[in-house]
Amino acid sequence: MPRVTDRYIQQRRGEILAAARRRFARDGFHATTMEDVIAEAGVSSSVVYRWFRGKEELVAASISEVLEGVVDVLEETLQVEPPLPVTEAVRRVLAAMLERMTQDGEDLTAIVVQAWAEAMRDPSVKALLGALYTRIRDGLAELVRRHQALGTMPPGLNPEAVARQLFSLIPGFVVQHLVLGPEGMDTYAAAGEQLLGDDAAIRSSDA
Amino acid sequence: MPRVTDRYIQQRRGEILAAARRRFARDGFHATTMEDVIAEAGVSSSVVYRWFRGKEELVAASISEVLEGVVDVLEETLQVEPPLPVTEAVRRVLAAMLERMTQDGEDLTAIVVQAWAEAMRDPSVKALLGALYTRIRDGLAELVRRHQALGTMPPGLNPEAVARQLFSLIPGFVVQHLVLGPEGMDTYAAAGEQLLGDDAAIRSSDA
């Protein structure tokens, strides 16, 4: 198949997904119909159904796309040498998430919150979220272990337990952002550095 | 009105609400009908409708009851002298939440996650959550200020920003508990103490 066709096909798929995300964020997974997505995307129904057999596939694809971007950013931050301070790694993940979330000019963080609710009812959504969240938690635990090996975090910390606390800063940010109004992420992240007295931050800036 | 009747009436209301919470946790706010709640409660529909005009009132009452208990525990922990270490305050709030959540032998944390999703669509749910979350955040900020006044937390911390991070530990716990399986709260809370190097904990145990 020639390249231009591949690109065209991928672009169509991306447009349909973007339309679905906008409707899901605005009206919720349950209230949104395939017809709503077709109207929002401004394409024929046959084009939409060529890509997505039904709403469930659209829901899963929307969640994956939003969250896989977050996981990718985390995995990138783990490659940095010397290892980034833990609060800086979390800050970069949040920044990437917010950037993706607002790229269509609408706040798509609502997709994440709905994915949690959906996971309570739909085991496939729960499995999808579980796999992505496990990668995030494992990545944070690995970061803690690297700092411990370098002496930039205390050896007595339990890396898995610390990763759970660091992970919490992500959904915690989303919930406060959505329920209590737009959050200044920098203030939030800076408080983390202050609160943790992020030794790693101080030592790696000395290096 | 004689006491016994008051008590009877309150008990009926509580039973209906417990039935609603169980169905909401299992099937979600959207899929649950008034008929489902009536069947689950095992009472006549007239009894249910005497208390709740419709599903929206039941949803709001379920969310309030679950979250107001959490706020009450936090406000209690703020009365303790000398002030509790911040991680201990968060641990108590989580413990109270989990205890309430599992009192019916079912995991009702799903109610909280659904309340977030509902807040995206229903401004009255958003306002209800917002008011309760503001009380929690304000309470945590006040705790930080008391520690600062006593010299048990650094004076340079921004109490409001720190409160946002501490608040995150609550929804963060709920999300991980629901998506990645039951969490040992003590391990989670202990990691917080280790991570924060909770000076306040050490100094108040010396006092």
Image: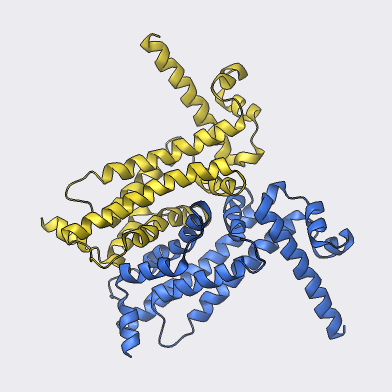
Chain colours: A yellow, B blue
Q: Nearer the viewer, residue A48 or A131?
A: A131
Q: Residue furthest left?
A: A207
Q: Is residue B15 left or right of residue A4?
A: right
The spot of residue A158 in percent (x, y) is: 32, 64
Q: In which quadrant of the rendered image does the C terminus of chain B lie?
A: bottom left
Query: Residue B52 lies in what quarter of the image?
Result: bottom right
Q: Nearer the viewer, residue B11 or B153?
A: B11
The spot of residue A179 in percent (x, y) is: 53, 56
Q: Is residue A106 visible?
A: yes
Q: Residue furthest bottom?
A: B207
Q: Residue at x 61, y 70 (%)?
A: B100
Q: Is residue A77 left or right of residue A173?
A: left
Residue A81 position (above or below residue B89): above
Q: So how many labels did they put on this image?
A: 0
The spot of residue A109 in percent (x, y) is: 48, 45
Q: Residue at x 47, y 53 (%)?
A: A177
Q: In which quadrant of the rendered image does the N terminus of chain B lie?
A: bottom right
The spot of residue A55 in percent (x, y) is: 61, 32
Q: Is residue B109 left or right of residue B19?
A: left
Q: Is residue A108 visible?
A: no
Residue B5 position (above or below residue A130): below
Q: Is residue B31 left or right of residue B111?
A: right
